[in-house]
Image: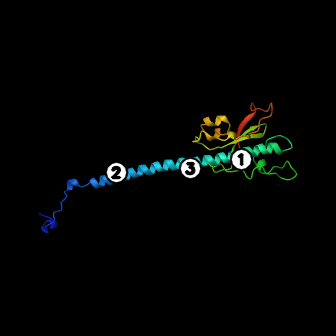
């Protein structure tokens, strides 16, 4: 039995059942390949977002370290604040002084909670409570110190004021790492 095209003088090949499925297989591989490309793009996008949040964390941490140094330098006594809220409104003066505009939110957690490095009830440094390992390991701000390049978590990025410690004040015993509340 010939096809209707063969009667009209056209010689189109007639495909049998054995050749079906190759197109389906080709489309299946094409969809799988596109899925892999989209998955790789998701990984790259996630890393770009993490790098952006790290930049925000570094900027906020530097600002908080500078506020701690300013609090100590401008006060009648050379002490650090007992609470982060004291950086926003310093009541040691006849009129309130602002060393920090507000307590910034951690870019990773989205909350205004920070880990605190304290000694004798004074805040000596702040760090993020976010889980995860930093991508950036070089060209870090001096407020983090030299040990920050080997950090395995964001909690090891401790932002401290750049001013030299008073003799005998050191960073020896009595330093505790606590969690801040709002």
Residue placed furthest toward the bottom: 8
Q: What is the number of callouts on the image? A: 3
- Tell me how far mark 2 sits from mark 3, CA to CA: 30 Å
Residue placed furthest toward the right: 94
Q: Position of residue 174 (x, y in %)?
A: 76, 33
Q: Which residue is mark 1?
A: 63
Quarter of image, res 155: top right
State which mark lies toward you, 1 or 2: 1
The answer to the question of whether label 1 and label 3 lie on touching residues, with beta carbons closer than 8 A, is no
Q: Which residue is mark 3?
A: 49
Q: Which residue is mark 2?
A: 29
Q: Nearer the viewer, residue 140 or 172?
A: 140
Q: Position of residue 51 (x, y in %)?
A: 58, 47
Quarter of image, res 180: top right
Dot placed on the residue nearer the N-terminal end, 2 or 3: 2
Circle 2 crowding by C-alpha within 10 Å: few under 14, some 14–19, many from 20? few
Question: Helix or strand or loop: what does disc 1 sit on?
Answer: helix
Quarter of image, res 83: top right
Dot placed on the residue nearer the N-terminal end, 1 or 3: 3
């Amino acid at each position: 039995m010939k096809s209707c095209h063969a009667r009209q003088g056209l010689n189109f090949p007639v495909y049998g059942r054995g050749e079906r499925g190759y197109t389906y297989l080709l489309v299946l591989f094409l969809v799988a390949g596109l899925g892999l490309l989209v998955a790789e793009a998701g990984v790259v996008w996630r890393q770009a977002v993490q790098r952006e949040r790290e930049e925000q964390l570094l900027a906020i941490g530097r600002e908080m370290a500078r506020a701690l140094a300013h609090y100590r330098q401008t006060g009648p006594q050379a002490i650090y604040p007992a609470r982060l809220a004291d950086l926003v409104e310093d009541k040691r003066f006849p009129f309130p002084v602002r060393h920090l505009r507000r307590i910034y939110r951690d870019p990773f957690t989205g909350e205004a909670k920070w880990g605190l490095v304290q000694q004798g009830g004074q805040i000596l440094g702040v760090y993020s409570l976010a889980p995860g390992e930093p991508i950036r390991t070089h060209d870090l701000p001096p407020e983090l110190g030299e040990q920050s390049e080997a950090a395995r978590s964001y909690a090891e990025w401790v932002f401290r004021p750049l001013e030299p410690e008073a003799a005998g004040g050191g960073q020896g015993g009595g330093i505790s790492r606590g969690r801040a509340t709002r």
